[in-house]
Amino acid sequence: MDRKQMCIANVKYKKPTADDSKRAKNLLRYLTYRDGRDDYVKQVSGVERWVDRGLGSSVSEIARTCDDFRSDHVLAFTLVFNPNPSLVAMIPHDDREQFVKELTDSTLDDFFEARDIDTGVEFSYVLHHRHTDDPQAPGQHDPHTHVILPGTIWDEEVGERSDLFFSQNKKVNHIDMLHRATEQNMEHLMERYVGPDWEQRVDALFELREQQADVTRSEAHDHHLADGQAIPFWCGVRQVDEENCAIGYYMPFIAEEGDVPDIQFRPIATGLQTDYARTLSTKLGSMMQAEDFGEADPLFVYVETVRMLLEDEREDIAPLLENTPSVTPDFDL
């Protein structure tokens, strides 16, 4: 697989101004009490949210240390380590938290060692357990860490703290170094947690998704009627992970105004066996092409038919009745 797809590692910073100091404290509170925009985390007495690697274990302590260790230009750096949810799905659920924590610790250790910073860099991080909002695969487990680094590090040679910086130029690119360290540690941990064949398995998963999307190369099964336009759609499936498949439809979507339409998948229900989902979507696709639904929108007919059939035949599937967005607002073509 493409190494750049294995894990996102982003770096930002806060300036040592009054406004940014206030924003930094608000960010720390947000990271402590939320797993995402809409997920409040109940605090448990005696259980710390932050993993302390020298910067602190609470909002007040981390904020105070960052203020003490700030440089003239940087109050604190913020990093995010976010493994690909498709890879996370291959890891046993009970091992995922430890996986992401090990990834964070080992990547930072290797990154600073590669930069010849051998005096250690203080940091703290918090683990979040959100779920994906990707419209093609909503609800996947998406654990990730938010890391706080100070604006300075201890310099043994001069006997005082010196500026911590992230250069990005022709001579040295610390962002590239961080990404390489992240990719190397992802490879090592995937092999240890999943097995030596993890890459072949994930390649097979991505290849299967491409094969499933080939349905869009054939004639559309029918058209969705929106704002006077007839928008083609294809009944189909998309593999969520190695065990679970989703049934839904493919249709052109525009992410932002002015973009070229991009055919994407939208699930109706997930948690299905691949063969079952494929057989059902194929039969319904043939039905859509053969039937005339009069004034009814064919897409709504397809969606409701899938839901009714699954409710009647399978009680163990996970219909996306609440999580799937309303159909019409999404088709801004």
Image: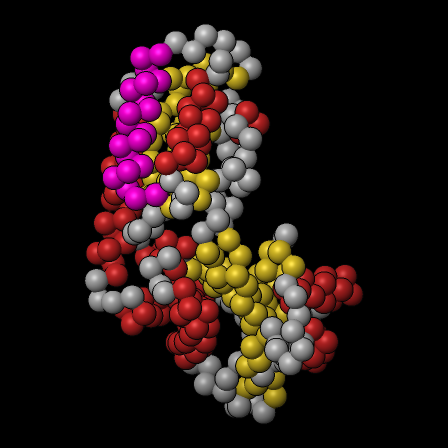
Residue 301 vs 161, above or below: the answer is above
Query: Magenta stretch?
Result: 272-291
Which residue is pictured at 21% across the width and 56% down the height? 200
Image quarter for residue 237? top left
Residue 127 vs 139, above or below: the answer is below
Front-most of residues 45 and 83? 45
Question: Percent x, y for residue 162?
Answer: 59, 80
Question: Percent x, y for residue 188?
Answer: 30, 70
Residue 97 vs 138, above or below: the answer is below
Which residue is pictured at 25% across the width and 67% down the height? 195
Which residue is pictured at 29% across the width and 72% down the height? 192
Q: Residue furthest right?
A: 18
Image quarter for residue 32? bottom right
> Is residue 333 at least partly visible in the picture?
yes
Q: Residue furthest front?
A: 312
Question: Percent x, y for residue 73?
Answer: 66, 68
> Is residue 176 at least partly visible in the picture?
no
Magenta stretch encompasses residue 286: yes
